[in-house]
Amino acid sequence: MEDVTFLMNSLWTMIAAILVIFMIGGFILLEAGSTRMKNAGHIAGKTIFSVGLTFLVFWAVGYGFIFGGNGNFLVGMTDFFFSGQESGASDLSDSVFFVFQSAFAAIAVCIALGGFAERAKFPVYVGFTILFATFVYPVVAHWIWGGGWLAEHGKQDFAGSTVVHLTGAMAALAATILLKPRIGKYNKDGSANNLAGHNQVYTTLAVLILWVGWFGFNAGSTVSVEDAFFGYVALNTNLAAAVGAVAALAISWMVLGKSDIVTTLNGALAGLVAITASCAFVEPWAAVVIGLVAGLLVFYSMRFFDKMKIDDPIFALSVHGTAGVWGTLSTGFFATPELATVGNPGLFYGGGFTQLGVQALGVFTSGLFAFVVSFIILFALKKLMNGLRVTEEEEIIGLDISEHGNYGYPEEFLTKENAKKLTS
């Protein structure tokens, strides 16, 4: 039976890892569809490159900093250049667990790089990916998942509302501040122009891919088939995503007079992000409440950041940041005594403010650390690389051609160029 359990747990976690890695395809379509046609190829290509780079960095140092032994409350200190040898210390393959965790690191990088969209130099992606995957994500992950100081306080974050989503969003915030808005985004009077994404079908398909992949993200974080508890986690995940989409559509319809598709899509994602921390700790009715609040919050958060002139093309700050904060805090309200295998029950279940305080502490320290270190990294890269941003001319013609020498949509642009030549 021990052998069967080991194989079943390993198989389930490997399937979950594949689902999480496939989420990267969702991020490609989401970011490409949310931006303009002239940058689509660049966005798709840099994502694959950055993910590949992240996997290598995670193998070399990231995994060791998170889960290595002989560490301290900040980082682990063993298992660098992960060998793949099975320790036999758990009922799950060490190699499968490594692959599963490497996928989470890649998702955090994808979120962070969303803040660079349509204006950053390609070498900046390279430098930031290496440094973020070494010094930012693994440190926060160790604090909460690797036995670090927040884990000792009982911080609840089952699948990463803080570890993955808030960390990536705070890095994206640092990038948007240093890079400044895209050309044409804001007028002199402070009003914003809608630099609409070029393909809403891409963004919609992206959300569906991410929704499906999230079952690997959340339910897979059980890393076990015991009692089929992954089904319960999947139930809560699905409910939060569904109500997040509906709530976002409803609030946009009420306020704007139109059922905005972009808001609806972001509502579904916000519901998924919010339930990620609490999916194993709360009852289904609470998952509905968590998703509902996330769907409402993302609508107002998107408008807030726009008013603050923070240019966030893929709404990473609202979807992953605001919803990540709410999702992390929500366990402090809704975690039940029976399900709170980490920390304490929430406020509504007689636990008082203890767990809510721990959750708030985790949000503040993790978010601040991710922002400050990411800002320092980007500021240093700005000095070393003579700026983070492409030239005005390169930004106007698009990063496909200026950074890579080829169009993501060659027929579209080459036809226009030929037409100009024929009429000149």
Image (tube, rainbow, N blue to C red):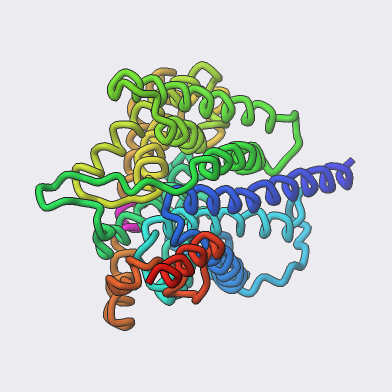
Q: Which residues are magenta?
A: 367-371
Q: Is residue 370 magenta?
A: yes
Residue 65 in view of the camera: no
Residue located 54% across and 50% down the image: 29
Spot occupied by residue 106 in the image (x, y as percentages of width and height)? 55, 58
Q: Is residue 245 magenta?
A: no
Q: Nearer the viewer, residue 134 or 144?
A: 134
Examine the residues drawn in magenta and state their main secondary structure.
helix
Spot occupied by residue 226 in the image (x, y as percentages of width and height)? 75, 34
Q: Nearer the viewer, residue 224 or 256?
A: 256
Residue located 78% across and 58% down the image: 88
Spot occupied by residue 20 in the image (x, y as percentages of width and height)? 63, 48
Residue located 24% across and 61% down the image: 180
Q: Nearer the viewer, residue 169 or 394?
A: 394
Check the image and name the residue furthest to the front: 423
- Relative placement, left or right, of 389 versus 8 is left
Q: Quadrant of the N terminus?
A: top right
Spot occupied by residue 135 in the image (x, y as percentages of width and height)? 43, 68
Q: Quadrant of the C terminus?
A: bottom left
89 shown above or below 157: below
- Relative placement, left or right, of 215 versus 137 is right
Residue 1 in view of the camera: yes
Residue located 47% across and 34% down the image: 265
